[in-house]
Amino acid sequence: MSSLQMPKIDSSILSKKDKIVSDIGRIVNSKNVLSHPDELRPFETDGLTAYRQMPLVVVMPETVEEVSNVLKYCNENKVKVVPRGAGTGLSGGSLPLEDCVLMAMGKFNKILEIDYENRCVVTQPCVTNLAITHAVQDKGFYYAPDPSSQIACSIGGNVAENSGGVHSLKYGATTNNLLGIEVVLMDGTITKFGGKAMDSEGYDFLGLMTGSEGLLGVITEVTVKILKSPEIVKAALIGFPTIEDAGNCVAEIIAEGCIPAGMEIMDKALTKATNDYSKAGYPTDAEAMMIVEFDGTEHEVEAYIEKAKQIAEKNNSSSLKVSKSNEERLKFWAGRKAAFPACGVLAPDYMCMDGSIPRGKLAEVLREITRLSKKYDLPVANAFHAGDGNLHPLIMFDANDKNSLKKCEEFGADILKYCVKVGGALTGEHGVGIEKRELMCEAFNDKDIQQQLTIKVALDPNSLLNPGKVYPILRKCAEEGRVHVHGGKTKFPDIPRF
Amino acid sequence: MEEKQNFQTSLDFNQNIFKPSTREEIVEIVRNCYKKSIPLEISGLQSKNKIGRNFQAEKTLDLSNYKGIIDYKPEELYIKVKAGTPISEIEEALKKNNQQLAFEPNDFGYLFSGESNSGSIGGVVACNFAGSRRFKVGSVRDHLLGFQGVNGKGETIKSGGTVVKNVTGYDLCKILSGSFGTLTILTEISIKVLPKPETSKTLIIKNPHVKKALDYLGQSLSSSTDPSGGVFYPDYFGKNFILNDLTHDGGLTGIRIEGPMNSVDQRIDRLSKELNLIDNEFSVLDSVQTEIFWNKTKNLEVFKNSKSNLIRIVVPISETLQVIQKLKKDDLNYFIDWGGNLIWMAFDHLNSKILAEIKEITKNHQGYYTLIKIEDDFKASADIFTIDPIKYKISEKIKKSFDPKRIFNPGKMYTGI
């Protein structure tokens, strides 16, 4: 494990392990308390595998009362608690602490109610994102946010991280698709924020909790809105001779009043890697390759595709193909979705960054990344959710070469700092967690961070719930780990990442 | 005297009304009030200042001079403005680029003063009231990308930014939206803007029955025709709409469809078939009439010059019928927006017994209410906003974390907050 400063270990808690295990074993079914190292091992890391730490004990509550009683117990006995959903997060939000109770929510895995009249689903938090869509698709509905890990990530985790996805430009991220949550605070208080009605009375605690990365409460129930599936979806695959042309095309499509369901750009390096890896059939001569997708009714989609075509041609597109069938559309996407694994064969390791930038700064940021690539002498490939300005540079390196790893980390930090400098954000959808914690001072000053910490203290005065995440412990802009993939093997190699 | 006040700078602390034009002045005023524990009423363009509880504030911080567009990037879909900027000025600027504030801010001017006053962007964010497109595009809070503000200690804080995808730290944009100026004084606001649809049309169904109307609305919102507005006006209010293609003056259900021209026609046609409407049962408003119709709706113009109290009730659509049946006296007193999820209901007279009943009914039906307009005699003692004891306790803590001495709009939302 890399040397990342975590909260001070309370040795008195370590020495009371047996008592804590037996106490918690009286609150929940004792079979649901794990304490043997062999049982703890699977929980030592999440999707950010560069960091590993065994927890003191794992508890798997089955009811909201159990969650409440465990938290109350831990609060009274000053035991740290780290909540965990499916453990697929990419920023280390569920990384355990040596002296923590890891609260694994895996037993909250049932959909509680499908309410078509109010167009919502009430579910327990460890139901996967995709399972919600699967539960309602026979009636022609779906749940809109679609993080690439949707096959495995939990809806509670989505709420904690405010997960996005390819379609968030048109449909928003988790926070815009959420109606209510039930949450347990560190002192054991059980409460509901929102519900089936829109907005809520008083302060918007639902909005505050969403994206709070498990620092403010443990989510025990989620109500999401579901949408009617669009009648038709079409995509265009467009090649451009320069990144600037592609960037201008994106800006103009938006300015023309078309809001695509998804708009993706890959640079030449990534296009080539993808073609070699998955025979995607992308145009290899193009410096930038774009997929733009529209959904809606037939006439609407036709009108937008036509407009996008005209704009692309005006911006010197070198090739343009519109999907003629759903199969062809999915083929366009198949290459894009294979882009990350494709990088895995180009180098022993790669790190996936997650910055957010104004769409119009794409060419500038990519030029800077190219400059940095030369400076650090490491190859890089770029994928970009162009519609909403979310950039995923993939830096290739060799982790066995310490110098290469160090250079990679510095390179990554420089990219994120540049994203902030051009008016963007440190993280678009992966969360801060421990991964970007030390970079928070790039985006916020002391007063900003202090205000956020004051909220934390208001709800968790002893700072016991997921401490050490999101906010810097030492104020230094360190170069910490990103999503690090070695030999093409991620923690969950079968989960798509794009 | 009035003119003299306008020239006062914030630096004269003997004044009761501060009218700062820079953030530095706002910071100085707040620091001073924090030091001396002087409560401040935060005020904008007076369009919604009557919403909320009565409270005592020694001084007023009037933000109407703190205005102007800081940065507008149509291709980046955002506009950054100072908090006191009038909504009308923002909408004017957006119109030039064929863009809009998709959440359709309500204009409460007609209700309170009989004429248009859509207020300032700061006020709109502070109240978080969205218009008819709410069920499709979200509320004001869903469009607030970032802010800069001054907390109760006089510290300048910020959160969010100008990009849509940003999960860096707690989402303070959400907690400040709808906080009625009780947590932080917003200074700069970055709001997401969206393209105006190429055209829009409205399917008007002649029908006086609320049950049938809710069926129409429910079916429409669950249809792939993707409506962006759904209202029901009972018989009495039908008269308020004098439009060429609105051929009767009774109760009506209006469903708005927006998008490219041929797509709108196709969807209107499909929707009328899905709802099994026969020819003389409906009419279609063109884009000009559609704009008039929905403006009147978002501006609550049917309650213009009304002396009644007005309550805003939000419930899930499955509960709307029962809530109306339990509360309504006649057709005079309500209409339905948000595709069935929002009831605007007027009461000639309110007292604590009636209000307790309304509270009980909305709560039992999984909703909540906000008292928008209320007779002066009753205002001092009425619960303007609902809250449960647990949320009250959490609200107290959150209030303290932003405004430890309770100097911003103290008591405007709840006693002690």
Image: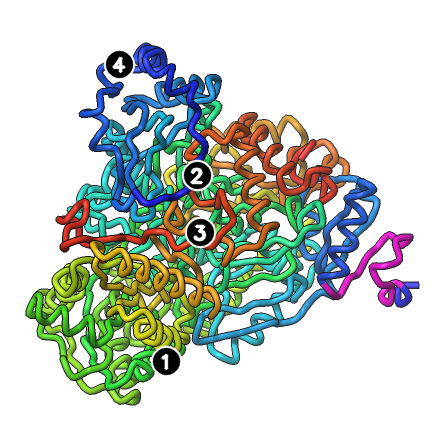
Question: Is disc 2 in the same subunit as disc 1?
Answer: yes
For the residues tagged 2 and 3, is the chain the same?
Answer: no
Query: In the image, which disc is placed on residue A29?
Result: 4
- The chain holding disc 1 is A
Give the numbered dot on residue A252: 1
Residue count near mark 1 (Cα–Cα under 10 Å), binned few <14, some 14–19, many ≥20: some
Amino acid beneath label 1: Glu
Query: Do labels 3 and 4 touch, CB within 8 Å?
Result: no
Residue B42: x %, y % from top left: 72, 51
User: Label 2 belongs to which residue?
Assistant: A468
Residue neighbourhood size for the residue with mark 2, other residues' Cα within 10 Å, grouped as few (<14), some (14–19), many (≥20): many
Between marks 3 and 4 in the image, the one whose residue lies nearer the viewer: 4
Dot 1 or dot 4, earlier in sequence: 4
Distance CA(mark 1)–CA(mark 4)? 59 Å
Q: Give the Cα distance between marks 2 and 1.
A: 42 Å
Q: Nearer the viewer, residue A243 or B313?
A: A243
Which of pointers 2 and 1 indicates the residue nearer the eye? 2
In the rendered structure, are the residues bearing label 1 and label 3 in contact, judged by CB atoms less than 8 Å apart? Answer: no
| Element assignment for label 2 | loop
Q: Which amino acid does label 3 sit on?
A: Trp
Q: How far apart are marks 3 and 4 (CA)?
A: 46 Å
Earlier in the chain: of badge 2 and badge 1, it is 1
Going by the image, does B109 lie left or right of A127? right
Are tags 2 and 4 found on a single chain?
yes
Q: Name which residue lies at 10% across and 71% down.
A: A275
Chain letter of the residue beneath label 4 in the structure image:
A
Tag 2, which chain? A
The circle on residue B338 is 3
The magenta segment: B5-22
Name which quarter of the figure residue A121 lies in: top left
